[in-house]
Image: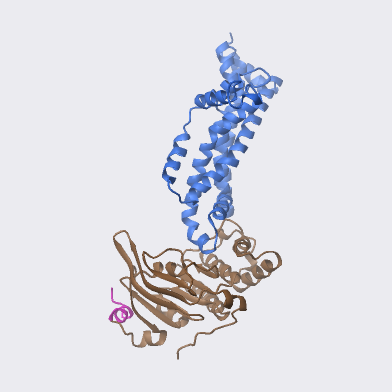
Chain colours: A blue, B brown
Amino acid sequence: MHTIAESLVVAAGLVGTFDPRLVDIVRLSLSVSLVATGLAACIGLPLGAAVAVARFPGRGLVIAVLNALMGLPPVVVGLLVYLLLSRAGPLGRFGLLFTPKAMVIAQTILIVPILAALSRQIVEDAWSEYREQLTSLGSGTLESAMTLLWDTRYSLATVLLAGFGRAIAEVGAVMIVGGNIDGVTRVMTTTIALETSKGDLPLALGLGFVLIALVLLLNFAAHATRAWSRTRFG
Amino acid sequence: MRREPGPGPVSASRRATGGLPIVARGVSCVQGATTVLADIDLTVARGGRTFILGPNGAGKSTLLRILHGLIAPTAGIVTWNGATTRPLEQGMVFQRPVLLRRSAEGNLRYALALAGVRNGDADRRIFEALNEVGLSEVARRSARVLSWGEQQRLALARAWALDPEVLFLDEPTASLDPGATRAVEKIVADIHARGTTIVMTTHNLAQAKRLADDVVFLHGGRIAERTPVDLFFCSPRSQEAAAYLEGERL
């Protein structure tokens, strides 16, 4: 059993020397979460923009549901995806359970409501400013939604970073559908949980450093993007 | 001497598919418990410069939006050359210029693309429009970092490029200094000289004197009078207009 100080020194060494096992885990985490964020962006951003611009019966309910789903518990998402992908489930024949693809699906489901709800708010604020001008120019609902998505792209980049941060820091869903299989579906968060439970702290701490560094980097990137866009585009 | 409305070089296609005259019959607009407009009868004919004047809260901006088809009246009907759907050959410039987060040129290109104008024709129109409003030098700069006056001129350049049949302007010089105001007035006059019908609201009486052909005076959501501009300023027919011109609080 390492002391905390010893663990910190060994963890720093693992990070500093780019320990191959740590690098593999970080690489898998990044690829799963990046793909999930990309897929979620393709669904969530147009959905958010459409809800922002369109007027239809039940719109208020849709907004309330989207907002509520932002707090979707990861373990519940993991359980639902597990049921869908398990051998007896409707998608069982694809053999996706305990693969990185299953983890991508779970993370995508988890962050779509976040991207949709936050982008809905941003696009709706822009829509209140642009609505009359775009209508005057003859822009339809779909064109307006696409225009506003492009016009608010720097604010939406922050939303994407928030979604990615949520995905990469999530543990419950990927643990259930990925199975935490060494070298196959073991990502940073599930490794930290496993190694801590085994009392082997250096790798957990090393991955913790990387995770915190990533979160900080994302926040700096979000801040820098906002500041740059304000200066560049007003 | 009253200026005659100049018909200008209206294109054949605009004549064929035009939305003039705009006719409002019995138009009312109620927002919540407030009657903003009541029983408005108004016709906007081709080629003129109609200025809508009136005190704050008289319903000028609402009337402009109804005539443009941006909002529907709660009672009455508006027709554009007999049709009940708004034609696309109209433009509007707002008091606060609304520009997209892209370059000055990009804003014009976007509007032209919506109107189905692309490629070489779009390039030519953008060049002409930016040149007309004196913004050629800032064509590639982001529109929203331009000064307020430049942004308003860019909004007018967008109208110039689209060459609308009717241009609605909602107090376009309200936030501008005298120099920028004169620049905007010159552009509006140039747009009118090309054959575009102008409908504009303003609080600037000197501006109305300089630019208008006729004045629609609104008071309390009703048209108090519609008069040729010279007559309006010499001998207004309504007590409300006379009081307004005297600077009395209405």
Q: Is residue B200 magenta?
A: no
Q: Residue at x 57, y 83 (%)?
A: B8
Q: Reply above or below: B117 against A120.
A: below
Residue B103 visible within the image: yes
Task: Give the x, y percent position of residue B232.
Answer: 37, 84
Which residue shows up at 67% across the image and 21% down it?
Answer: A184
**Quadrant in the picture for the C terminus of chain B:** bottom left
| Most distant residue in the bottom direction | B1
Left or right: residue A222 compared with residue B234? right
Residue B142 horizontal/vertical position (percent): 60, 58
Tell me the quarter of the image containing the N terminus of chain B: bottom left
Query: Which residue is at the front of the view, A207 or A47?
Result: A47
Mark yes or no: residue B176 visible: no
* Image: B206 above or below A201: below
- When the figure is inspected, residue A70 is found, relative to residue B4, above or below; the finding is above
Image point (61%, 70%), residue name: B161
Task: Residue at 45% x, 89% y: name it.
Answer: B2
> Looking at the picture, how far across and down is residue A94, in whole percent?
66, 26
Residue A197, by quadrant, is top right
Residue B99 locus on image (x, y percent): 54, 60
Between A211 and A182, the one lying in front of the other is A182
Q: Which residues are magenta?
A: B239-250
The residue furthest top is A1
Nearest to the observer: residue A197 or residue A149: A149
